[in-house]
Amino acid sequence: MTKPDSPVLLDVRGLHASVAGVPILKGIDFTVRAGEVHAIMGPNGSGKSTFSKVLAGHPAYEVSAGSATFQGGDLLALEAEERARAGFFLSFQYPIEVPGVANAQFLRLAYNTVQGARGKDELDPLEFDDFVREKMKLLEMDPAFLDRSVNAGFSGGEKKRNEILQMALLEPSLAFLDETDSGLDIDALRIVAHGVNQLRNDRNAVVLVTHYQRLLNYITPDFVHVMDGGRLVKTGGKELALELEARGYDWIQKQAA
Amino acid sequence: MAAQASGSFLSTLLAGAAPGGARQWLKQLRANALERANALSAPTTRDEDWRFTDLTPLYRLALHAPGESGAVDVEAHRIAEAGSRLVFVNGAFREDLSEGIGGSGLEVVRLRGEFADAAWLSAHLGQIAAFAQDAFVAANTAAMSDAVAVRVPRGVTIDKPLHCLFLNTEANAVSHPRLLVVAESGSDMLFVEDHIGTVDGAYCANAVVEIAVAENAEVRHVRLQREGKAAYHIGTSAASVARDGRYRCWSVAMGARLSRHNANVRQDGEGTHFEMDGLALLGTRQLADTHSFIDHARAHGTSRQMHKCVVADGAHAVFNGRILVREGAQQTNSTQESRNLLLSDKARVDTKPQLEIFADDVKCAHGATVGQLEAEEVFYLRSRGLAEPEARNLLTYAFAADMVVRIPVPSVVRALQARIIERTGGPEIP
Ligand SMILES: Nc1ncnc2c1ncn2[C@@H]1O[C@H](COP(=O)(O)OP(=O)(O)O)[C@@H](O)[C@H]1O
Ligand SMILES: [Mg+2]
């Protein structure tokens, strides 16, 4: 449901960003209010992941113009880790494998770091074990994933579930899910979507970056945006996603041109 | 001049070598080795095999044969899972400190003084670690006055690890520890070759371990080099593996000022399987040199090797991974990977794969990377709230720990993880 009266979580104005000297984002305006679900769709290479990473604070991307206000503060002034602690979350399109570190160890380290920064209680290994197992049930994840190395040898779907598990632990106020649905079979997609829906409330918001309309059958967006050439060229309701699925992107690119 | 220094060094090395032995074959073996040791010159950086590893500081040491070791506390070095333990102090076997052999299923023979001779001894001792071209192996073979041989009888599975503890307690001493492990057909065992130094002063440990894996037997070999910080460690482990035999080795080098490990595995029958995981974790001005040689001499052999180096400060790691696939060794499947992480501008790695393939129907893959941490990996962890130094430390820890967590002895894994954390500032272990 659109929430015109609820507080603005994220307000992006005229954002330009480049990587290795190449301009990728060319003026993005984007506003998310608490309680909303947004979808950003668009062809490959249009800049969706770049937008997500710029907001998450990837140091390789340089913001050349524009602003991003997150919960009233300057998001772009913060380091990546400060953004995470402040409640910004990015579910990676390609989660990183960290062989040699047990998932449980990593999850607890992330959880306690963020909790500590928020002035909340940290958990010892035993307490955390109980806590994380509860969260794993939400995603129908086998507890065996706690003992395995972070994402190492996980299937695509297992990695994406592990991302949403991190979202569940870190309780962000704004989560960007970058192609969390790509490569998931229908059962896994349902489970992940169910998990995300369970984590939603009227104080947080979700931005679904996706290629496919399919995910939007399970998580209903309030707004659908189309990214093309580093700009959001069209915004509509959930019916826009169906139209994109049926007609592709050409007609929008022609309209925008 | 280095040549002169190295010449006199060999006589130092051989100071304690009074060729002898209660049995004629042993006497002969040691005499042959002494002859070779005298004929060979000690290596210099002009030798291709020692190009990056300059032994000059070793040759300058005034070394002597070790004295009586007396009372030694081995409790701190105990490995909880071990069912039996052989202890060597400064190269000499210490029966009084060893335990658990009776009832372990192992036969242990000490080749000193009068010993019960048996065919399996003369068939293997000195036959796997070739000394013809290697001055250090020749010196060890000539000087071994206290070798110990372990036999795993046919078809026997030894459930608990055998801990072979090689302690060095004396500065300026040169020791020649020697071990032979013979796993008879269908047997299965795991042993930990554990080199530990308890002195801060310089010393030289010149160790040789030979491993004979008979048909369809399996030997798992954990090799820990945790010598003292000023130590010189020269070690050879040589395995010979018969048809369908399996040899797996996990090797960790983290001690010594300068260390060299020659890891040689030879295929002596078809269908063998080798796994070699190596980790060098170095800092200060340490140098660790690993030369591995996997000899696929027969058909249907498989080998998988991963060698990692984490190099901090002004340390230097060397890896030379030779794989020989001989004519007729068809259907060999061999992979080798060398991955290296440099943590400072002054840290250095020299890594070289050396593939020599003389059979046409084989699969061999190898690769080497040298670098810093990946920016994407650091970003991933930072996006989960970890500060940049924490993220880097965790990734460095992970890079090294990934090799250690594979070791099938949990208490060794934990001890090594703790050491890696000390070195990398990694996470606390739950
Ligand atoms: N690190 C990078 N270095 C160079 N070019 C990049 C980098 N990241 C993204 N790009 C380029 O930016 C454009 C947008 O990429 P991306 O944001 O991944 O698109 P999307 O997620 O919409 O598929 C592409 O042309 C891509 O090649
Ligand atoms: Mg993308």
Image: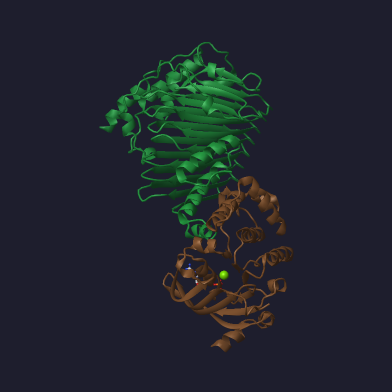
Position of residue B277 measured from the top left corner of the image (x, y, whole percent): 54, 42
Q: Which residue lies at the image location 54% right of the left edge and 62% below the top edge?
A: A84
| Quadrant position of residue B412 | top right
Q: Which chain is green?
A: B
Q: How many marks?
A: 0
Determine if residue A45 is in view.
no
x and y, in percent, of residue A118 in the image: 55, 58
Instruction: Point out the image quarter for the N terminus of chain B.
Output: top left
Q: Which chain is brown?
A: A
Using the image as rendered, state which of residue B133 and residue B398 is in the foreground.
Answer: B398
- Viewer-closest of B243 and B144: B144
Q: Residue at position x 32%, y 38% from top? A: B46
* Colouring mode (rainbow / by chain / secondary structure / one colour): by chain
Front one among A37 and B211: A37
Q: Using the image, determine if residue B53 lies above or below residue A37.
A: above
Q: Spot the residue most to the right.
A: A187
Measured as percent of width and height from the top left, residue B92 is found at 47, 19
Q: For the point 46% across and 54% down, which residue is it?
A: B373
User: Left or right: B288 with respect to B97?
Assistant: left
**Image: A190 above or below B61:** below
Q: Quadrant of ligand 2?
A: bottom right
Question: Looking at the image, can residue B6 be seen?
Answer: yes
* Residue in the foreground of this view, choosing between B128 and B74: B74
Residue B251 location (% of width, % of height) = 51, 37
Q: Is residue A82 above or below residue B320?
A: below
